[in-house]
Amino acid sequence: MESSSSFPDVESSNSETSSINTGNTSSSAGASSSATTLSRYENQKRRDWNTFCQYLKNHRPPLSLNRCSGAHVLEFLRFLDQFGKTKVHTPICPFYGHPNPPAPCPCPLRQAWGSLDALIGRLRAAYEENGGKPETNPFGARAVRLYLREVRDLQSKARGISYEKKKWKRPPPQQQSTAASPPPPPPGAG
Ligand SMILES: [Zn+2]
């Protein structure tokens, strides 16, 4: 059983206000009808963004958004790992490289690479929608990209799952050249 994304508060609740305690429990006073028409992606993005802002608020020492760097984003991703539900086997585990282990093992649970990758994409967009400049976007930092790549490689080895990008490859055009075409298969021998 593997859920593709599993973050605290961002995924578990489908109510408008997540369980994050922001200290602002009252619903907005004015117009509130537009929120329901937001797409699922937009909702998720908003919740992710709230989670990140909350993380910054609780950060010790306190951290403001405009001082946030790629290193802080990595901290955030590692922080999320404690809520992960994806088993990532260590190299000494007998199930290392097995996508479907037959028995439980004490290996740690982590956030799945795909979840982190999607999360970073949403936060990256949210950062700029909230006034951040693209050139200082910490979610687009090189360190973050490298970290995600590392996680992907590690998890694909540990879980025996390939995360190769499914690039849409165009099938080669059917050429009508008489010379290069292979002979048609013989009619069913019987
Ligand atoms: Zn294991």
Image (cartoon, rainbow, N blue to C red):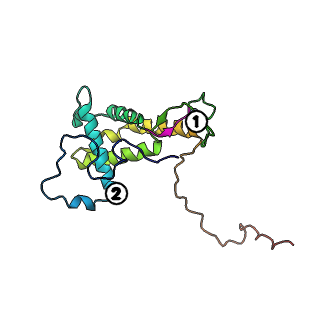
Q: Which residue is mark 2?
A: 40
- The residue carrying pointer 1 sits among few (fewer than 14), some (14 to 19) or many (20 or more) residues within 10 Å by Cα, namely few
The residue at the far top in this view is 61
- In the picture, the disc for residue 48 is none
| Residue 136 visible in image | no
Amino acid type of the residue tagged 1 in the rendering: Pro
Whether the residue carrying mark 1 lies under 8 Å from ligand 1 is answered with no
In magenta segment, residue 88: yes
| Residue 8 visible in image | yes
Closest to the camera, between mark 1 and mark 2, is 1
Q: Name the quadrant of the C terminus.
A: bottom right
In magenta segment, residue 135: no
Q: Residue at x 49, y 40 (%)?
A: 86
Q: Secondary structure at mark 1?
A: loop
In space, the residues marked 1 and 2 are separated at their CA atoms by: 34 Å
Q: Position of residue 91 (x, y in %)?
A: 59, 29
Q: Which residue is mark 1?
A: 104
Q: Position of residue 130 (x, y in %)?
A: 22, 47
- Which residue range is magenta in the image? 84-89
Q: Position of residue 54 (x, y in %)?
A: 26, 38
Amino acid type of the residue tagged 2 in the rendering: Arg
